[in-house]
Image (cartoon, rainbow, N blue to C red):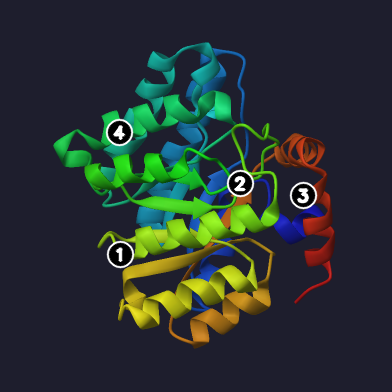
Amino acid sequence: MSSRFVAGFRIEDALSATAALESQGMTVTLDSLGENVSSPGQARQSGQIYHNLLDAIAQSKLNANVSLKLTQMGMDLGRDLAFDVVSGLVQQAVRNDGFVRVDMEGTPYTQATIDLVRQLHAVPENRGHVGIVIQAYLRRSAQDIETLLADGIRIRLCKGAYSEPPDLAFPAKKDVDGNFVALTKTLLKSGLYHGIATHDDAMVAAAKAFARTERIDPASFEFQMLYGIRRDLQRSLVKEGYNVRVYVPFGEQWYPYFMRRLAERPANVIFLAKNFFRN
């Protein structure tokens, strides 16, 4: 079952999946699975995998970037450690004309993640080479997006997959959907290149309708979806002329990664089960 949603164990597996998706007209962001490391050595080892990945992407001339989690880079052990590891990766992305996306984790890390990305992006040579993820189910996200856009930081907007209390996150789907649409409109009007990450037909339709109404060039943004999820929708969007980027996870840590996500939020189980049998 995992092979439907995870590209494999090795960098070579991820690159093979990337090439296959490129042949279908899609781009990719690669994620070496892992989070919450317990030693500085593990954090630097995680960083080295991404150094190797960035080099492999450049050498293979693939249209791909990378996504990482700060807890995988040692955030729980100290902010300075995580900043040092990620800063080195962003510097390499600059040299390779690449891009590093810092994923968003649970709310204990939200402000720290935003602060770290803003600090990295403030380095002149890093501008345009580092981005962030914002989760639409958080009540604070509209203000966070305003702050990030003022800095010129590229954003991936998703709904959010962690279990959060109702004072921090909208508990009702209709409210999450409403906020997602509102934030999508803000991003599309910003003039920066952002990713709208959703598998929800209604959210996709809302983004497309707004772009048409406002005469926003489809080339100025992209839809993002998970590897193995809604492959039918991915292909149809490409045929319609939209940019589609697929989030491709790989690595030996796939089992604990999935178990944590499924345990945190039962809705994730239903989501994966529904998509396992889709084309």
Q: CA distance from mark 3 to mark 4?
A: 30 Å
Numbered badge on residue 189: 1
Mark 4, residue position: 118
Q: Quadrant of residue 59?
A: bottom left
Q: Secondary structure at mark 1?
A: loop
Residue at x 78% of width, y 73% of height: 278
Q: Earlier in the sequence, mark 2 or mark 1?
A: 2
Residue in front for this viewpoint, 215 or 123: 215
Say whether marks 2 and 1 touch (CB < 8 Å).
no
Q: Earlier in the sequence, mark 1 or mark 4?
A: 4
Badge 3 local density, few (<14 within 10 Å), some, or many (20+)? some
Which part of the image, by quadrant, shows the C terminus?
Answer: bottom right
Numbered badge on residue 160: 2
Horizontal arrangement in the rendering, residue 143 relative to residue 168 (left or right) = left
Q: CA distance from mark 3 to mark 2?
A: 11 Å
Q: CA distance from mark 2 to mark 4?
A: 21 Å
Q: Secondary structure at mark 4?
A: helix
Point out the frontmost of discs 3 and 1.
1
Badge 4 local density, few (<14 within 10 Å), some, or many (20+)? many
